């Protein structure tokens, strides 16, 4: 699993930083998380394969998280997409999309509305499980937890020889199947394989003030993205607007015992954002800036 | 008067080219013409003063001409604008803007709806007159003619001495006023001044196939922007979609005896657009590519 940052700024673009958007890639599938204005241009800049995006997640109804969606959807259509697209979003977004579609798209958008104030599973396939969870912003907002499924099981050569499992069945063993011999005897999967790599977790907390409501769900994730709109100097604005300072974001990471923290959603008032990195690292050393074009391996 | 290109591509962004948007500047006022996605980022790139934009003109309801508007309007608000903004557009755009405004803007948008199939004056102030005219696209679409008002009258020093006009009145003479002496005798303006520079005209024909309906209004303009979505190789697509080839755009310019032609709205199928310049220049030599960041003096 990896995370590519397409946009790192807050409410308005500034200093070459675009509004919020990210691509989470799991086993060659791209999952688009928020879609601020210009996200589709950034996809071109960073060579994101749009045909591999089948799922889009919009955290809340502030424009810096969705104004780029209509252009993206339109471009998919003009580029001949016919595969359906799943859109996980607040219910209000549907009417906004539909009023702007002046023609019938050649593909279907399947809407899945986020449930306010509820933790719920949005998606569960062979590669990944995605869970929405409420955060603490000025309007209803969800974060998203990506859980990369356990990797394929590891084959144990000596055991395979001992139980005489035929080679053609090895790939099915790796997927977790057991083998049934001609005489009907079952060779259980766990006799001849070991667990694959542990599942990995990425949590995206969207726009939020620090709040205990999402502490449990982000606990011990491998990578946490947390907004960090302000420096400590403007902590009053963070409180007023349902946002976070860099130091507060780091405190969230520390309390949740996450492995790594990335911070973004920087206010347009800052030309340089290094001071936020410093403030965060004082509290939680394993912090990076979620700058555009950066890729974080989970 | 000058024209700055913010976006030069057609339906979708490609090869670093953004969708259509331009800024026409007349006497330090900026007039925004169409507003494709990312226009506000390009304004930052090219240092356009957004506070000097009080009038926005949207030619038609294809997204590549307005998807950037909501983000622009939102950013104006977040940057503290309180001056009213005049928006000249198809009526359908109002509902699209309003459904996306999740808060009350600190400034007022004054809507002026374009009249289908009618040539009509949109704006007439001391600096400029702007006229909308219908063009020939797949949906109702208007072009815009900008007429920079006649410059200040030129003072004639010898005549001023002869008629003994006091110096404090010179600026009013330049504006066209006549001077009344203490004895009631009037010194007519044209006795002591000469005409300023001739008015200048810029025509923006938006998206259009070549058509006689707008021939008269663009006749002999100083600068013509005409779309040129395709090369001759794809002339069939131009016809099918209500667009133009570079060569056709040049024929329009030639027939209308304009002074200079700029071409844009390039299809995403072309990485290089020089071939369009060559095709156009064969027909109308004084042609330039309307590439992003280019400024054309009128």
Image (tube, coloured by chain):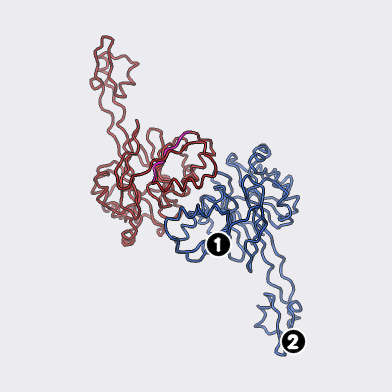
Chain colours: A blue, B red
Q: Which residues are magenta?
A: B83-89
Residue A111 lies in quadrant: bottom right
User: For mark 1, what is the residue?
Assistant: A86
Q: Are marks 2 and 1 in contact (CB under 8 Å)?
A: no
Residue B175 percent coordinates (x, y): 31, 24
Residue B200 percent coordinates (x, y): 30, 37
What is the quadrant of the C terminus of chain A in the image?
Answer: bottom right
B222 relative to B189, above or below: below
Q: Secondary structure at mark 1?
A: strand
Residue B160 lies in quadrant: top left
Q: Secondary structure at mark 2?
A: loop
Res. B251 mark: none
A106 relative to A115, above or below: below
Q: Chain of mark 2?
A: A
Res. A185 mark: 2
Residue furthest toward the top?
Answer: B183
* Residue B182 placement, left or right of A202: left
* Residue B22 placement, left or right of A228: left
The alpha-carbon separation of the residues under discs 2 and 1 comes to 43 Å
Q: Nearer the N terminus, badge 2 or badge 1?
A: 1
Residue A210 percent coordinates (x, y): 70, 46
């Amino acid at each position: 699993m990896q995370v590519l940052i397409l946009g790192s700024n807050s409410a308005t673009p500034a200093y070459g930083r675009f509004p919020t958007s990210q691509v989470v890639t799991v086993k060659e599938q791209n999952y688009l998380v928020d879609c601020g204005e210009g996200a589709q241009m950034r996809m071109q800049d960073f060579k994101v394969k749009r045909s591999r995006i089948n799922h889009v997640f919009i955290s809340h109804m502030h424009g810096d998280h969705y104004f780029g969606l209509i252009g993206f959807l339109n471009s998919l259509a003009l580029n001949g997409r016919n595969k359906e697209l799943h859109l996980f979003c607040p219910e209000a977004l549907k009417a906004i999309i539909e009023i702007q579609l002046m023609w019938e798209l050649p593909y279907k958008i399947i809407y899945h509305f986020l449930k306010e104030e509820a933790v719920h599973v949005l998606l569960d396939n062979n590669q990944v499980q995605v869970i929405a969870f409420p955060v603490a912003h000025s309007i209803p907002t969800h974060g998203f937890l990506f859980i990369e499924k356990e990797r394929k099981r590891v084959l144990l050569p000596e055991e395979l020889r001992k139980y005489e499992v035929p080679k053609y069945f090895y790939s099915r063993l790796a997927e977790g199947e057991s083998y049934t011999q001609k005489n009907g005897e079952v060779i259980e999967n766990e006799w001849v394989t070991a667990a694959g790599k542990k599942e990995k977790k990425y949590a995206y907390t969207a726009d939020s003030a620090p709040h205990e409501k999402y502490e449990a769900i982000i606990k011990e994730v491998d990578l946490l993205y947390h907004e960090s709109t302000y420096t400590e100097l403007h902590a009053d604005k963070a409180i007023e607007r349902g946002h976070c300072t860099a130091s507060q974001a780091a405190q969230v990471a520390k309390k949740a015992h996450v492995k790594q923290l990335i911070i973004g959603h920087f206010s347009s008032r800052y030309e340089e954002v290094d001071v936020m990195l410093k403030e965060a690292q004082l509290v939680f050393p394993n912090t990076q800036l979620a700058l555009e074009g950066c890729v974080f391996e989970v």
